[in-house]
């Protein structure tokens, strides 16, 4: 096997490898390299774990593997300005306390790009690390049950990082906790629990990601000023399946997303939370879900839905706990189950779109009735109540200007 090559200030250092059957030692090579050098690895398997403690470039050229030997994190970056690229990183430890990862970042202005991270508990872990770039990595956790896997990317007290064009497969979550001003764009994720989970994390931008076949799409908890736009979220199913969830979060903007084939499309719980704030839902497609838009309680004033397409859902809108969303703002949305007309042909329904509390809403207030949702008996009771109601039914929500067409722009 050829030796590894280090290029430093125009000089080449050769490190003689041991027997071919053993992983090549890498840490001594990194320790001997000067700051600012480029460490080019020849094809082969190298021994980890390793620690990068100075700014340099470690490049595997797509043909080098670092094996963590099941101990700790395969690569730890404990410096500013380092780059780890074109490597295959495998076999981290299994400690959640130690956050054993493919790459553990404890510095700023580092780049982790074009790596394949496999059989590692966590993928890339950033802790108190800012202005890093995590780009075009393929990440898979260890082959264990979902709850025992680590997160594909984990941000903890980390700011102004860019998480771009990565692929997450069979990891647990991607989490952003106590972290602000991060850009998360162009990623894909499947086979996990939370595609993305925010907690106490303000002012993050999430755009152009694709998440499917996860238990939950994107969940925003106690996080204000988050922008979610142009994302595709699909097939979040199961007892707790939801495409997008907001809990006690304010000034959230949800724009031009496709949320499809989920148990619950958008689930809102005590949001917006701060007084005199709004959460905006604009130009989204909410389609083919069990429930399109769901409020968990008496919705707080401040949710604004404009220009959305709500179609193909078993239930367009639901409010739990005998509550109402009548004080929320709905305007200019397309509702597939709207039964009105447009006699003046202005693209807007002549009468408001309204949801009333008929018998088909019993399942929202009485959990046991949910078993019969969609059954002929419940549909028959609902028909009778609509045909000859004994009292005026409570109104749950109103859109005064429903769109008549999906394509219409008001």
Image (cartoon, helix red, strand yellow):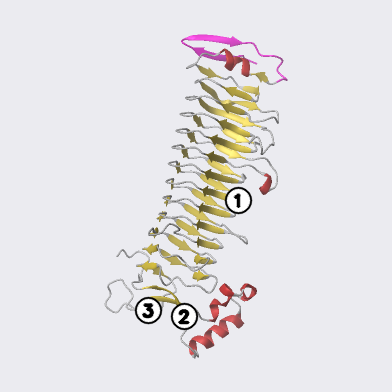
Residue 108: percent from the left, percent from the top?
Answer: 48, 29
Disc 3 crowd rating (10 Å Cα; few below 14, some 14-19, many 20+) is some
Up-down relation of residue 137 to residue 282 (above or below): above
- Residue occupying image coordinates x 52% and y 85%: 383
Q: Is residue 310 left or right of residue 197?
A: left
CB atoms at circles 1 and 3 under 8 Å apart? no
Up-down relation of residue 65 to residue 147 (above or below): above
Magenta range is 1-22
Disc 2 crowd rating (10 Å Cα; few below 14, some 14-19, many 20+) is some
- As for residue 157 lying within the magenta part, the answer is no
Q: Circle 2 sits in a helix, a strand or a loop, which is it?
A: loop
Residue 191: percent from the left, percent from the top?
Answer: 61, 49
Residue 161: percent from the left, percent from the top?
Answer: 46, 37
Tell which tag, 2 or 3, sits nearer the viewer: 2
Q: Which residue is identified by label 1?
A: 193
Q: Is residue 120 left or right of residue 130?
A: right
Q: Circle 3 sits in a helix, a strand or a loop, which is it?
A: loop
Disc 1 crowd rating (10 Å Cα; few below 14, some 14-19, many 20+) is many
Counting residues from the start of the chain, the first of labels 2 and 3 encountered is 3
CB atoms at circles 2 and 3 under 8 Å apart? no
The image quarter containing residue 405 is bottom left
- Residue occupying image coordinates x 50% and y 52%: 222
Q: Which residue is identified by label 3?
A: 340
Q: Which residue is identified by label 2?
A: 394
Identify which residue, 223 or 173, lies in the foreground: 223
Distance from label 2 to label 1 (Cα)? Answer: 37 Å
* Mark number displayed over residue 159: none
Counting residues from the start of the chain, the first of labels 2 and 1 encountered is 1
- As for residue 8 lying within the magenta part, the answer is yes
- Residue occupying image coordinates x 61% and y 75%: 366
Tell which tag, 2 or 1, sits nearer the viewer: 2
Tell which tag, 1 or 3, sits nearer the viewer: 1
């Amino acid at each position: 096997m050829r030796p590894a090559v280090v290029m430093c200030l125009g000089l080449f250092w050769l490190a003689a490898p041991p027997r071919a059957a053993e992983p090549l030692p890498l840490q001594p090579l990194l320790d001997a390299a000067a700051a600012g050098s480029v460490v080019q690895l020849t094809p082969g398997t190298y021994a980890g774990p390793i620690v990068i403690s100075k700014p340099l470039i470690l490049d595997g050229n797509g043909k080098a593997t670092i094996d963590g030997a099941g101990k700790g994190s395969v690569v730890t970056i404990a410096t500013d300005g380092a780059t780890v690229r074109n490597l295959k990183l495998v076999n981290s430890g299994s400690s959640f306390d130690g956050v054993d990862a493919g790459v553990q970042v404890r510095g700023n202005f580092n780049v982790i790009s074009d790596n394949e991270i496999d059989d590692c508990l966590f993928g890339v872990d950033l802790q108190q690390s800012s202005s890093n770039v995590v780009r075009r990595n393929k990440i898979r956790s260890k082959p264990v049950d979902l709850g025992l896997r680590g997160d594909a990317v984990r941000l903890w007290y980390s700011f102004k990082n860019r998480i771009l064009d990565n692929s997450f497969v069979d990891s647990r979550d991607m989490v952003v906790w106590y972290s602000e001003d991060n850009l998360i764009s162009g990623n894909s994720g499947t086979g996990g629990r939370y595609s993305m989970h925010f907690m106490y994390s303000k002012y993050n931008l999430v755009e152009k990601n694709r998440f499917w076949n996860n238990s939950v799409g994107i969940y925003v908890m106690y996080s204000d000023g988050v922008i979610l736009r142009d994302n595709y979220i699909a097939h979040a199913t199961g007892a707790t399946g939801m495409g997008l969830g907001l809990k006690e979060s304010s000034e959230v903007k949800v724009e031009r997303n496709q949320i499809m084939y989920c148990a619950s499309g958008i689930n809102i719980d005590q949001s917006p939370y701060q007084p005199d704030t709004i959460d905006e839902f604009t130009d989204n497609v909410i389609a083919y879900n069990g429930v399109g838009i769901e409020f968990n309680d008496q919705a707080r004033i401040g949710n604004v839905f404009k220009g959305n397409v709500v179609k193909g859902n078993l239930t367009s809108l639901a409010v739990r706990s005998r509550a109402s969303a009548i004080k929320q703002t709905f305007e200019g949305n397309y509702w597939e189950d709207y039964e009105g007309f447009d006699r003046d042909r202005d693209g807007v329904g002549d009468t408001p779109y309204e949801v009333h509390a008929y018998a088909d809403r019993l399942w929202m207030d009485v959990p046991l009735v949910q078993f019969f949702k969609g059954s002929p008996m419940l549909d028959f009771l609902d028909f009778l109540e609509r045909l000859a109601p004994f009292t005026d039914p409570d109104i749950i929500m109103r859109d005064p200007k429903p769109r008549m067409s999906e394509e219409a722009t008001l």
